Image (spheres, coloured by chain):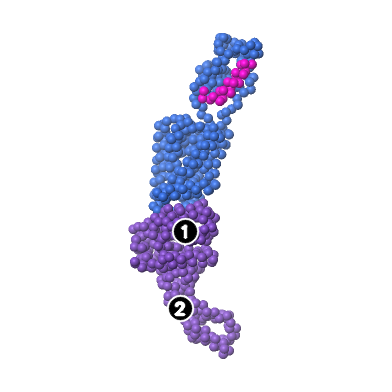
Chain colours: A purple, B blue
Amino acid sequence: MDHVIVDVQDLVKRYGAITAVDHVSFQVNRGEIFGILGPNGAGKTTTLEMVEGLRVPDEGTAVVDGIDVRRDPRGVRSLIGVQLQEAGFFDRLTVEETLQLFGSFQRKMLPPADVIDRMQLQDKRRAWVMNLSGGQRQRLSIAVALINDPRIIFLDEPTTGLDPQARRNLWDVIERFREEGRTVVLTTHYMEEAQRLCDRVAIMDHGRMVALNTPRALIRTHAPSTTVALTVLDGDLVYASLPGVRHAEVSNGEVVLATSDPMQTVQALMESSRAGQIGFHQLRVEEATLEDVFLQLTGRRLRE
Amino acid sequence: MRAFFMTINMGFRHYFRDRSTVFWGIAFPLILMGLIGLAFGRSDSLTFSLGFVDRGGGPLAEGLRRGLNEVPVFRLMEETDEPMALEALRKGRRTLVVVVPANAGEPVRVYFDQARLQDSRTALVILERFIAEANLRLSGAPEVVRIQARGLQGQRQLRFFDFLLPGILAMTVMQTGLMGVTWVVAEYRQRLILKRILATPIHPFVFLGGLVGRYTVTNFVQMAIIVAVAIFAFNATIVGNPATVIGLLMFGTLVFVGIGFAISTVSKTPESANLLGSAIHFPMMFLSGTLWPREFMPDFMQPVIGLLPLTPLVDAMRAVAARGDALGPYLGGLGYLGAWGVVAFALAAWRFRWE
């Protein structure tokens, strides 16, 4: 069995003068959680919808489990589960009826009761969709994506708008998909989500893919510095010449150091303190995140 | 096929759970029918107009004339010509016609319309009581004046509700298309429900066909309830062939669902679709003869009224349902309506957008 399950080559989508997706290529491996991270408007959704066969690319190809999306979009859709960002359902159907209806649109269908159990919607089985909370609605949306027992699940910003508790619940659900051997492709603009969930992350900005790797490797490559921060009470040092420090910022007694060797830097600070050169408190060491990677790659923050 | 029937099934449930659509689809037409019936439809009046033909001019006629004028529920209309009086009876303008003979020995003839037994019988009973009393007063013995009742085969009296019901049904058919379909399809599009369905392997036409099916089914349930209430509560009758009536309604439903689809494709939001639908719906509702005869409208508007797609449906429905006419003379108009349907579906297919 081929280990590449989604193969995207040079996808381009233009809307008038704007190139929404600009020569994007990537491969998704069978059984992984693949994340597309980027700010709003980066082209994540457009990319996903071209792979799902909902939009026709201007250039490039997308092959899903051996099927070319442009040649057989409905063939692809029968293999995949799709959760669309903000897609609505019928207000006055119950959760169970919604699953029966969407199941009837599929070539293969899991028992709705099983899917309801898995998405923890048992209490809401007979509730109308219009009476569901945001988190419940999102779980229904994923339940609909699951009803045809797909090998690949596409989730477009699955946790946007959810409270932290609901978000964590959903992360557990998505990790279960991976344990069951399904492949998950998701988009997000939450770097914690990408970092916590994804085996590999593609970073998109302005329609381009600017990096693709495991979260750890991305940080190692693009944001190798660790931040050491401290509040200085008295004394002074030439912080920039401490071991490992690449960059130092001092303002009002707040010192922020970017270091490639946090152990050495902290040790030097402790020694200076013991020697009476400086007095400080609140020493904090912060690992770099994908946020820093994004900042490094684009010069902007993810959420502005 | 499973997807098609499931779409109808779930759409049907969705429809009946929405009180506002049930109100507009069922309660509103009934209320309208009741109100219009109250305003215009008092056909079962409590005064009976009697045509009075005096052929002898004798004292008997004079006595009867004076006596009948004193009966409060009778309105005496003096007639000179017997055939004209009978014609008025046939057309429903008289309840009874009383003919006083030239020879005193002949019985007084009373004509009534067999098609209006209820009114006729009541009037006859009152008349007979009156005659009996008159006889007693005249001589103390019965049978000085004899009356002879004769039934006439008049034109069937078109009762107001018989007239109104086909119009109301045609209006319901139009309303489903122009108010229901427009709103629902535009809303499904705006809320990305259509896109969500496109993200499944189903062929889009199966779902759209299911929507058409759903509107046909809900329409017929709606109309069955309206017809039942009209018959049992308002005493309306459908004279014509029920199969033809159902066929007409089915045809009308398809055409107006098509027009609804077309409107929804040229509108950006559900609100604008609804507005456009209403803008077409209301003029037709008042002009096309749904609620009152379209001849009530001024002459200069008649050509415009003739072009409205609802007009041929109302005409054909009324002819078949209320008068029991054959469909033949109305086929041209129905062809015109069908052309609207074809154009509407073509426009919808061409302009249809999923999101």
Q: Position of residue A160 (x, y in %)?
A: 50, 64
Identify the residue position indicated by label 1 in the image: A114
Q: Which of marks 1 and 2 is nearer the N terminus?
A: 1
Q: Taking the image as drawn, is residue A282 in sight? A: yes
Circle 1 SS class: helix
| Residue identifier under label 2 | A224
Q: Name which residue type carries label 1.
A: Asp
Give the total number of marks visible in the rendering.
2
Measured along the vertical axis of the image, is residue B326 above or below residue B308? above
B124 in magenta: yes
- From the viewer's perspective, is B4 left or right of B26? left
Bounds of the magenta segment: B114-133
* Residue occupying image coordinates x 42% and y 60%: A149
- Main structural element of the magenta stretch: helix, strand or loop? helix
Q: Which part of the image, by quadrant, shows the N terminus of chain A?
A: bottom left
The chain to which mark 1 is attached is: A
Is residue B119 located in the magenta-colored stretch of the structure? yes
Instruction: From the viewer's perspective, tell me whether residue B144 is left or right of residue A20.
Output: right
Q: Is residue B189 visible?
A: no
Q: Tell me the subunit letter for badge 2.
A: A
